Amino acid sequence: MSELIKKSAAELAAAVAAGEASAVEIATAHLDRIAAVDDKVRAFLHVATDDALAQAREVDRKRAAGEPLGALAGVPVAVKDLFTTIGMPTTCGSKILEGWVPPYESTVTQRLRGAGAVLIGKANMDEFAMGSSTENSGYGPSRNPWNLAKVPGGSSGGSAAAVAAFEAPLAIGTDTGGSIRQPASLCGIVGTKPTYGGSSRYGVVAFASSLDTPGPFGRTVLDAALLHAAMSGHDPMDSTSIDAPVPPVVEAARHGDVAGLRIGIVSEFSGDGYQPGVMSRFAEAVELLERLGAKVTEISCPHFKYALPAYYLIGPSEVSSNLARFDGMRYGLRVGGGSAEEVMAATRAAGFGAEAKRRIMLGTYALSSGYYDAYYGKAQQVRTLIIRDFEAAFGQVDVLISPPTPTTAFDIGERADDPLAMYLADLCTIPSNLAGNAAISVPIGLAPENGLPVGLQVMAPPLADDRVYRVAAAVEAAFTERWGHPLLAEAKGLS
Amino acid sequence: MPITRDEVAHLARLSRLALSDEELDHLAPQLDQIISSVAQVQEVAADGIPQTTHATGLVNVYRADEPVHCLTPEQALSGAPAVELQRFKVPRILVEE
């Protein structure tokens, strides 16, 4: 096993810039790792071997010619399979898009290419990003590198598993209800949901447009920040993109500090349903933050308990509209004969999996005349109340903290046909999606009862993304010193 | 009020999903359970609270009206299930009564 795969993205970019390693060597080392372990992890739906090597050769050519190199030159990145990529299939984990190769490129992947990153393949995901385990993928689940019988989380579970399994130092995902933070927590890595509108949705196949937020995964806080900075920024092609500078996330990640910081514990996110090991690690992190000089208090956000039901009305409503485009007419699967309506209904029944069907129908119900005010309208009011809870909290503290998810990684199959149990995985992450603010998950240890990773969620106001990195970097530095090694050094699922 | 199997069949038709009887049998109780659970939002006293459709508060965002490159017909049709005369070929949309 090449030592190159153990290096951080920051180290790899520096090595390429200094001429100590070539981009081709680095890409080859990661492609070899994928070939060695991905039949177990199943993080990838498509490994872009030739394309990745061509991208890497171009980085090496630029360096040899003395041309300027981007911030991520030569660093492999795994791409969740809902970012459109020219020359690589984009399935969204769905059979309805099997084999589809998009004719246009997403803004995020275009920016990463511009920064010299090497897009190494397309990562598995729950179908159209609906799920918390990757079990809703039309192509079978990914596995957690800590324990292959467990889920990696979802929906960006392939992205998280690829990073945790050292198949790529970085990955991009999307977070609509927790789909970056929850898998980051379950896989023992760092994952960020940027401020909504901070990263472009152009070329991100839509799930819930008012919530979808592309964001980074890395094994270190600094790596996540480097990717965050490279992928973000205003995009005229996305009408909800914020026309403001990217917050100074890299600077913050390099200077972790919580001295004097006011931190609020969300009091609603504890109690029944929270695994003991998740809560004991959380308590330990709180002690550590206090020792590092933070002022920690409890803050009540009384409407957060309505975030989950509001999300499961707003999300499906937007899904029922967004997934209407998959009609078997212009791209993707087409099944059956007869009239256009019959072909559409047969195509969608054959192409969508069970969760997509559930959510489309739930959304159709919530938007039906006669039910609209009682469900969708009410959920949109709850959204306002959750934003107000955050505003009141951020009047008293600088950041809020909670577990990212109530449990560690669960068994594959355990919640597969129990939608309500599966939805609980998003309990603590959804408020930040509804409010559009910034949040991160950073590893804080292993649950004593099962040896699986636990994360800490840090939430900050919109456009204060740098604040979550400053806290996460301080937590990472203090815990790494205490453990004597990075948490992932203890992952045994692949050894 | 529980969601009946007939209502679920109607939703499937509205959603353009040709579901099998087994799928309808399986989905009906699940949808009923999910809808009863999300109905908790109705407990919140929210009279006079405005609705939030998305978090940034942006309205009416336009790009400059400048011509830019768009997809060629070949690119636009590259994923089509059926193509004829440089157009998407689709099943008939009107049915004779």
Image (cartoon, coloured by chain):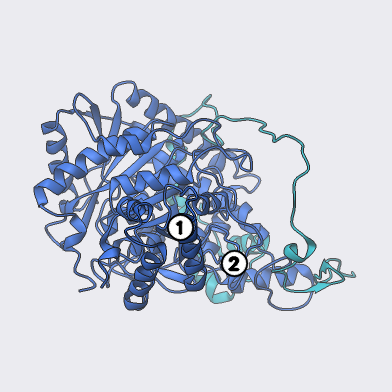
Chain containing mark 2: A
Check the image and report above or below for A370 versus B92.
Answer: above
Q: Earlier in the sequence, mark 1 or mark 2?
A: 1
Answer few, some or many: residues within 10 Å of disc 1's Cα (few below 14, many 20 plus, some between 14 and 19).
Answer: few
Check disc 2: other Cα within 10 Å, few if <14, some if 14-19, many if 20+.
Answer: some
Residue A321 versus residue A420: which sits nearer the camera? A321
Residue visible at 30% across and 39% down? Answer: A253
What secondary structure is found at the residue carrying circle 2?
loop
Label 1's element?
Answer: helix
Task: Check disc 1 and report the residue beneath it.
Answer: A64
In the picture, one chain is blue; tell me its letter: A
Q: Is residue B30 above or below residue A38?
A: above
Name of the residue lying farthest toward the right: B96
Front-lying residue, A104 or A461: A104
Q: Is residue A261 found left or right of A330 in the rendered image?
A: left
Q: Are marks 1 and 2 on the same chain?
A: yes
Q: Which chain is assigned cyan? A: B
The residue lying at 10 percent from left, 52 percent from top is A484
Pinpoint residue A80: horizontal percent, then vertical percent.
47, 60
Q: Which residue is mark 2?
A: A87
**Type of residue at label 2?**
Gly
Splitting the image into 4 quarters, where does residue B21 fall? bottom right
Label 1 with label 2: CB-CB less than 8 Å = no
Residue A165 lies, in percent from the top left, at: 30, 66
Percent of width and height locating residue A11:
30, 53
Q: Amino acid at mark 1?
A: Ala
| Residue A280 shows in this picture | no
Number of the label disc, if any, that sits on residue A273: none
Quadrant of the rendered image containing residue A409: bottom left
Report the residue at 35% width, 64% height from top: A162
Rendering coords of residue A214 (x, y %): 47, 48
